Amino acid sequence: MPETRSINQNITPKLMPDFRNLGTVLRIVLLANGIALLGAVAQASSPTALQNSVLQGSVLLQPVLLTSLLLLYALNPAFSRVSYWQGALVAAAIVALITVVFDMISGALLFLTVDTGLFHYVRHALVAMAIASILLVYFRLRIQALSPAKQEARLQALQARIRPHFLFNTINAVLSIVRADPRRAEAALEDMADLFRMAMADPHELVELGKEVALARQYLELEALRLGERLQVRWDTQNMPPDALIPPLILQPLLENAVYHGIEPLPEGGLVEVKVYLDGDELHLKVINPAHDRTQPRTDGNKMALSNIRERLALLFDVEAQYQVENDAKNYQVHILIPYVKGQAA
């Protein structure tokens, strides 16, 4: 008997920004400089005064911004282990402390300020904390806008959306062999249970790539029950890092789409190629299936699930993830690139 596992339906979005995400870093740099520029414009009395204010402000802003991002990058894993308000307070305090340190350095080395009293440093620290708080509020609102309760329910529904006729076909295939090969039928039912359990997992949770590939193999074994030799599969996982973390149920919808649109319409069947490999800091997932002229196109099939993959990749990895589709006369290829995240790092 396989171990029974509960399914957690209560999803708590992570409201602290991911300081190791390229999109987050770019937004912080642009917004911080934009806020500083807006403050300089509000205080300037002439174009010359504005230019001087921007130059002097950049001498302090850019080192503070770079150092803060580096330190927050290093502390990013710790933010996931504390509450949002604790993490926000620590982040704002770090920015304020770094601001005071660089303020002292710039005043001592460059003589940019005449007033170096306590109020001067307190004022700059409070401004830095205010800007940091504004950015944290922005990212909190952005995350809430991307993943409110309705969006979570929709993503869960899309993630769990496995075509009903796949379920019926699998059950019929199992029934056809239950007497002739009961062990194979039992294994097929266990594979199907694992597949649906994963389909209802938390869409924010990352899973190990090795487990995701094993689940994808289980899915293809279920499809092979009814398609037989028409379904040929070639796996290329020699350079696959099994400990890499990816969103759950990424490969299965791609394979389902390949079988449904690429193999089933062909009387002779065809080959589905799956390539999973690491190139530098990028993890590549490729699924290639035969392409053919469709005089009578099939129904929408699994398009909603494929759109869901794009949404989940954008939500979890922002601009660091890519979803590419290449289609020619012979092959249809889906290529996903995501950053390499190790299990221990997460």
Image (cartoon, rainbow, N blue to C red):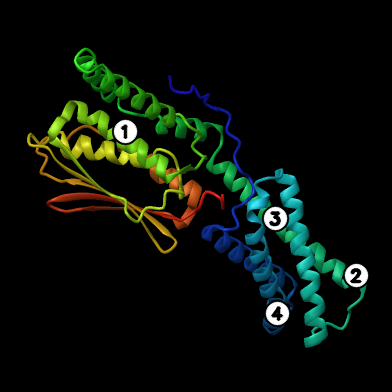
User: Circles 2 and 4: CB distance less than 8 Å?
Assistant: no
Amino acid on which disc 4 is placed: Val
Choose the circle earlier in sequence order: 2 or 4. Answer: 4
Residue 275, percent from left and from top? 29, 51
Determine whether the residue tagged by mark 4 lies in a helix, strand or loop: helix
Task: Report the side of 290 relative to 107 (left or right).
Answer: left
- Select label 3 or label 4 by which is in front: 4
Check disc 4: other Cα within 10 Å, few if <14, some if 14-19, many if 20+. some
- Tally of numbered tags: 4
Choose the circle earlier in sequence order: 1 or 4. Answer: 4
Residue 24, percent from left and from top? 56, 58
- Select label 3 or label 1 by which is in front: 1
Determine whether the residue tagged by mark 1 lies in a helix, strand or loop: helix
Question: Residue at image x 52%, y 61%?
Answer: 22
What label does residue 119 carry, if any? Answer: 2
Pick the residue in front: 343 or 303. Answer: 343
Amino acid on which disc 2 is placed: Phe
What label does residue 134 carry, if any? Answer: 3
- Alpha carbons under labels 3 and 4: distance apart: 22 Å
Pick the residue in front: 232 or 166. Answer: 232
Pick the residue in front: 299 or 19. Answer: 19
- Alpha carbons under labels 3 and 1: distance apart: 47 Å
Q: Is residue 111 above or below residue 251?
A: below
Task: Report the side of 321 relative to 343 (left or right).
Answer: left
Q: Which residue is mark 4?
A: 59
Amino acid on which disc 1 is placed: Gln
Amino acid on which disc 3 is placed: Ile
Determine whether the residue tagged by mark 2 lies in a helix, strand or loop: helix
What label does residue 218 carry, if any? Answer: 1
Check disc 3: other Cα within 10 Å, few if <14, some if 14-19, many if 20+. some
Choose the circle earlier in sequence order: 3 or 4. Answer: 4
- Alpha carbons under labels 1 and 4: distance apart: 58 Å
